[in-house]
Image (tube, helix red, strand yellow):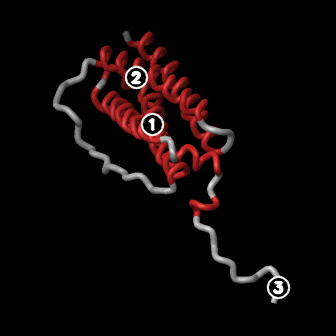
Amino acid sequence: MYPYTNHHPRLSTRETKDPALAELAEDSRLLSLLQVAVADTEQIAERYRRLLQEAEILSPSETVLKSMYLEEKKHLRQLREALYLITGETPEIQPEEQTPSTLEIIDPKTYLEETLLLELNAIDFMRNFFLAVPDGELRDLFFEILTDKQSHANALTYLFSKYF
C-alpha cells in the first residue's frame, strides 16, 4: 500500500475555504448587499423582458435587448455563485414568472430611460463589490458583471438616442 494513503479525516468545504472568503462570510453587511444585488438584477432582467415583449418601437433592436436580458440572467447565476463561494450555502432561487409583473402598460421612452438609470446605479454597486473582495475567482466574477453593466449602459444610451 502506498504510504500516503493513510486514513485521515476529510476536510469539509468550510475548513478548506480561502481565509479571505471566510472573512467575507462574517460580513453581514456585504451578504445583505449581495442579496440586494440579486434582487436588483432580477428587476433589471424583468425590465429587459418587458422591453422585448411590450415595446414594439424597439423591435428592430430585439437582438440587443435579448442579449442584455440573457446577460442579466447570467449575472443572477454569478451572484448566486458568489453567495455560495462566500457562505458555502446554496441560495434560494425564486421560480421565474412568465406573466407580466404588473398590468400597467409601459411607456417605452420612460421605461428605457429608467432602465438606463438603474444600470448606471448598478455599475457603481458592482464596482464597490469588485473593490471589496480579494483577488481571485470572486473578484473576476464581479469584474465581468461590472463590464457587462457598462456595456448595457452604452447600449441603452444608443437605443435611447436612436428611437427617442
Q: Position of residue 146 (x, y in %)?
A: 56, 29
- Image quarter in which the N terminus is found: bottom right
Please tell me which of labels 2 and 1 falls first in the chain.
1
Q: Residue at x 49, y 43 (%)?
A: 79
Res 2 label: 3
Q: Is residue 11 above or below residue 49?
A: below
Res 29 label: 1
Q: Position of residue 64 (x, y in %)?
A: 47, 28
| Residue situated in front as seen by the camera: 85 or 111 | 85
Q: Residue at x 44, y 12 (%)?
A: 162
- Image quarter in which the C terminus is found: top left
Mark 2 vs mark 1: in front: 1
Judged from the image, the secondary structure of the residue bearing numbered disc 1 is helix
| Residue situated in front as seen by the camera: 17 or 92 | 17
Tell whether 139 sits left or right of 66: right
Tell whether 128 sits left or right of 111: right
Judged from the image, the secondary structure of the residue bearing numbered disc 3 is loop
Gap in angstroms between the C-alphas marked 3 and 1: 48 Å
Please tell me which of labels 3 and 1 falls first in the chain.
3
Label 1 Cα crowd, 10 Å radius (few <14 / some 14-19 / many 20+): few
Task: Tell me the residue that label 2 is attached to.
Answer: 118
Gap in angstroms between the C-alphas marked 2 and 1: 21 Å
